[in-house]
Image (cartoon, rainbow, N blue to C red):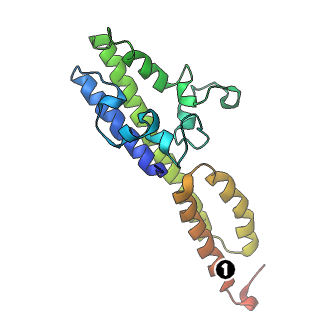
Amino acid sequence: MKLTKEQALNETIELFEKLAEKTREGKAMRKHEIPGPWLNYSACCSCCEYDGQFLNDCANCPMKRCWIAKGDDVYEISVAPECLHDKSPYVKWQRFVSHKETFHTIPCCIDIEFFCLLIADLAREVKKISKEKTMEIIEKLANVKTMPELDALREEVVERMIGHGEETFHKVQDAFRKAKNRLNRIPLKERTW
């Protein structure tokens, strides 16, 4: 199934909030034990389904940068998928829930809940940053005054929108077209470029 970035992030938030809630109730659970659309996805992960990608093909994972601990050089890490990097919050959560004999103890439940909430918060942050970047680009396009200015902005648009998904690309592409059409409607004698 092909999910949009927003769908993948929303489902990640929903899943990990449910996992945190169950843990708070003393019922630490694994992803496949929580009913939801993720049960139909590879690894029960909506981020693995984003943009029609498959497990271990994480080039477009919406949370790719979240899995790497600060200070680690993202480009030197050879682990694929990145969520399975030793220092990622996902692996830390996974380690707790994989120890059946201890994951129902109070200290372990507190740690499991913490990592579930951390992963949900990271997904929220990615969503927020993605929307802010998109709105910033769309605003810049709306304020362009000349065709050379629009051409200069084209490269920035392409560079900043890589990995933001098809849906976001179409929004920005529409804003670019509107800006170009608006500039093309300026009479020749009024153009300053």
**Would residue 184 appear left or right of 175 to someone viewing this image?**
right
Looking at the image, residue 187 lies above or below residue 92: below
Q: Amino acid at mark 1?
A: Leu
In this orientation, which residue lies closer to the viewer: 114 or 135? 114
Looking at the image, residue 73 lies above or below residue 105: below
Looking at the image, residue 169 lies above or below residue 55: below
In this orientation, which residue lies closer to the viewer: 26 or 2? 2
Task: Give the position of the C terminus as an image quadrant.
Answer: bottom right
Q: Position of residue 183 (x, y in %)?
A: 67, 80
Q: Position of residue 103 (x, y in %)?
A: 32, 14
Q: Quadrant of residue 56?
A: top right
Q: Residue at x 70, y 27 (%)?
A: 76
Residue extending farthest to the top is 101
In this orientation, which residue lies closer to the viewer: 45 or 152? 45
Can you identify the residue that label 1 sits on? 183
Q: Quadrant of residue 150?
A: bottom right
Q: Residue at x 62, y 41 (%)?
A: 59
Q: Position of residue 40 (x, y in %)?
A: 39, 41
Q: Position of residue 93 (x, y in %)?
A: 42, 22
Q: Residue at x 63, y 24 (%)?
A: 71
**Would residue 71 appear left or right of 6 to someone viewing this image?**
right
| Category of crowding for the residue at label 1, using alpha-carbon neighbours closer than 10 angstroms: few (below 14), some (14–19), many (at least 20) | some
Residue extending farthest to the right is 193
Q: Which element is circle 1 on?
A: helix
Q: Residue at x 66, y 59 (%)?
A: 157
